Image (cartoon, rainbow, N blue to C red):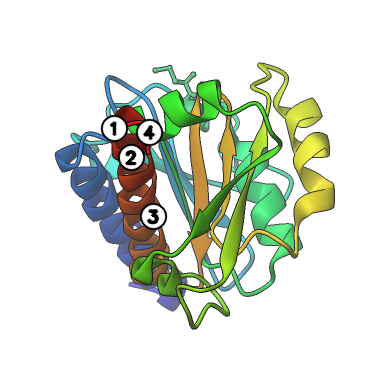
Amino acid sequence: MSETMTEFARAVQDILAAGQRMDARGWVPATAGNISRRLSDGRIAITRSGCHKGFLQGADVITVDEAGKPHNAGDKPSAETLLHCQIYQQDPTAGAVLHGHSVAATVLSMTEKSPALHLADYEVQKVFEGQSTHEASVPVPLFDNDQDIARLAREVEPSFGSMPAGYIIRGHGVYVWGKDMPTALARLEGLEFLLACMLERRKLGL
Ligand SMILES: CSC[C@@H](O)[C@@H](O)C(=O)COP(=O)(O)O
Ligand SMILES: [Zn+2]
């Protein structure tokens, strides 16, 4: 087995495990969500479009180039591949990207009219890049949903560099990334915990 094949096989394992974990938490209902890993040669291993992320098989992970073009012409990568490519392009340290559709992200983003949610006073916000205290305010930008993914990517573009916790697409879901899959999963877990707290507090009228 060549070194590149070994790295791809590891990426597939990471993606399948992440899909199961996200499914177990209820963050990828039906065929929602998509998951990717960047390989050292610049290729991106990403989920095929339309798969249930809790039941992924090895063959459900394919590779695309940095612009999102599949290496095998017949392959249909995630419909949101361009958002993954954009993250890898904008953040050279990013090695894994996760996208989920949790209830908390969906509901909060539809009720919040301002351009961002602000996480403040929570200990767990320290899971995000550069955060060392609950006393800070961590912005999570909100972008209107758009079926035109290239246009949505253009809306997101100016916010790179100021999204320590990722971002949310309204009525849709979160995008989170990290240097590797464990880091991306920790950030997703942290963000989803905080969104769930925020939703609970709003239900209590707090
Ligand atoms: C279940 S509809 C969700 C899709 O429209 C999309 O938002 C999504 O997250 C999954 O798309 P996919 O093409 O499978 O990666
Ligand atoms: Zn989605």
Residue located at (32% from left, 72% from top) = 1
Amino acid type, callout 1: Leu
Asked if one can make out residue 100 in the rendered structure from this viewpoint, the answer is: yes
Work out whether 31 lies above or below 35: above
SS at badge 4:
helix
The answer to whether marks 4 and 2 mark residues whose Cβ atoms lie closer than 8 Å is yes
Q: Secondary structure at mark 1?
A: loop
The image shows residue 103, relative to residue 142, as above or below, that is above
Residue assigned mark 2: 201
* Callout in the foreground (2, 3): 2
- Marks 1,4: beta carbons within 8 A: yes
Query: Of callouts 2 and 3, which one flags the residue occurring earlier in the amino acid sequence?
Result: 3
Residue at mark 4: C-beta within 8 A of ligand 2: no
Residue flagged by tag 2: what amino acid is it?
Arg
Q: Secondary structure at mark 3?
A: helix
Label 1 near label 2: C-beta < 8 Å? yes
**At 44% from the left edge and 26% from the top edge, which residue is drawn?**
106
Q: Residues within 10 Å of mark 4 (few under 14, many from 20)?
A: few
